[in-house]
Image (tube, coloured by chain):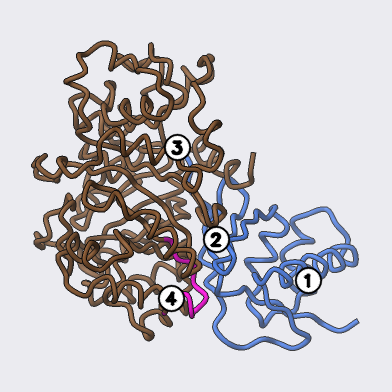
Chain colours: A brown, B blue
Amino acid sequence: MSLLAEMNDKALKLGVPISVHLDVTYRCNERCVHCYLDHDDHGEMTTCEIKGVLTQLSDAGVFFLTISGGEVLMRRDLFEILEYARGLLFNVKLKTNGVMIREAEAKRIRELGVEQVQISVYSHRPEVHDAITKLPGSLKRTIEAIRFLRAQGLKVTIANVLMSGNMADYPGVIALARELDVVYTLDPTITPKMDGDRSILSLNVDGSALDRVFHDPDLVGNVAEFCAPPPTPGEDIMEGYPCSAGHTFCYISPYGDVFPCVQFPLPSGNVRRQKFLDIWRGSAELKQVRAIRAKDLTTCSSCAHVGTCTRCPGLAYVEGSMLGPSTADCQKSFQRTGIPTANMLRHSSSQIGVEIGPLIHIQPLLDASAEAH
Amino acid sequence: MSEKYIMRSSAIAARMLGGEMMIMSVKDSTFFTLDPVATAIWQAADGRTALSEIVATKICPEFDVSLETAVRDAEQFAEELASRGILRISDLPISGSEQSASVRPTEVQ
């Protein structure tokens, strides 16, 4: 077990939220076709409120802090927030589209000691990337930002969301990542909008595309190992919990709402009305999430894939039950191994469309050591 | 033997977890944990207080160790952390902005 894994294990045993994702805004300068957010400002936390939350998170033991949006640089106080966060010694990861990052911003990000920056790139071709972001010239600006950040010696990760419109381009993005000397991650999923609109799910790639992705050694490394049939789950698997959501991780929205995860829209409290630790320790919703073990899952507990599936409890919740299956993950387990899931066997094939999916990061490629958690 | 001064680097992230200090270098993502003795030294590394004084005031009263042994071990420890870029070490007091020492013990359930 790595030292980091040991610390995660220790945090779990102590009930410490070692990692938090904080969105500081939902506003954005891009209008990505697949985005699940409402970009209007409905009353973001003020600078002072965010500083107060950061202090509470520090006191609660949070070490890994992801600051994201929206586009984080839409907040004029971003650097003040970053400076405050770094003063509290968080390990800060910044997610951005990079469009507003020039040399001066890159220098400031480095000076503040941000550990890594994740930037969304959808294609190596401007006509594809810019059509997805609906911002002309955005790919050029984004690549320039990556170069500015790399010139400062910062660690950069390209996040490539895969959808039907850019499916053919991921090898080009991998090549671009290599040229820029940055890490590449692929996310082959689209999630429903926050307002419940599921129309964007039509952008999801189909099964054959998933099959290609899962069998591409450039993405998964050892294909035979990655696509191997799942081993028989033991007691440790059945007594295990699905993921870190609500256990050592949570998400805070720009409005102060606390959720188990970015993809788990179960309102669990609000830091404008309650102390963070009171929510973390006392929320009935978080306690409910923490109580779930693999053996409790209604369909998945009898599935051969239960020990290896990327089942996202948040997406299962969106589908109807946090104890139920996430059909997109069923699809992925099937495409990866060729072995039908219990949920697929239970339903007719027509019901197993790729509707929603988890935030899968196939860790590939250029520098696996970059992902700290 | 000359006096040594140590100061925390600003290029680190740190947090207490169950009595251990977690530290990650933001430059190369190297991850460390410090035991209670090392944590006490690291927290006192303000660049102005001599290492021998840190050991005499923070370590010896708390841990069953002689001053001579503790200073020798502390210097070795400081050299190691300095080689990894998470401490600065000097024969003279170090000025400049140190990293905050506001790493309080995490409350656990």
- Asked if the magenta segment contains residue A210, the reply would be no
Residue type (three-letter) at the residue carrying disc 3 = His
Query: Residues at badges 4 and 3 in contact (C-beta under 8 Å)?
Result: no
Determine the chain carrying the residue at label 4.
A
Which residue is denoted by mark 4 in the rendering? A149
Does label 4 or label 3 sit earlier along the sequence? 4
Closer mark to the observer between disc 4 and disc 1: 4
**Identity of the residue drawn at 56% across and 38% down:** A222
Determine the chain carrying the residue at label 3.
A
For label 3, the crowd category at 10 Å Cα-Cα, with few meaning under 14, some 14 to 19 and many 20 or more, is many
Q: Secondary structure at mark 3?
A: loop
Query: Residues at badges 4 and 2 in contact (C-beta under 8 Å)?
Result: no
Q: Which residues are magenta?
A: A148-157
For label 4, the crowd category at 10 Å Cα-Cα, with few meaning under 14, some 14 to 19 and many 20 or more, is many
Which residue is denoted by mark 2 in the rendering? B14
Residue type (three-letter) at the residue carrying disc 1 = Glu
Q: CA distance from mark 1 to mark 3?
A: 47 Å
Does label 1 or label 2 sit earlier along the sequence? 2
Residue A21 horizontal side relative to residue B36, left or right: left
Tag of residue B79: 1
Which residue is denoted by mark 3 in the rendering? A215
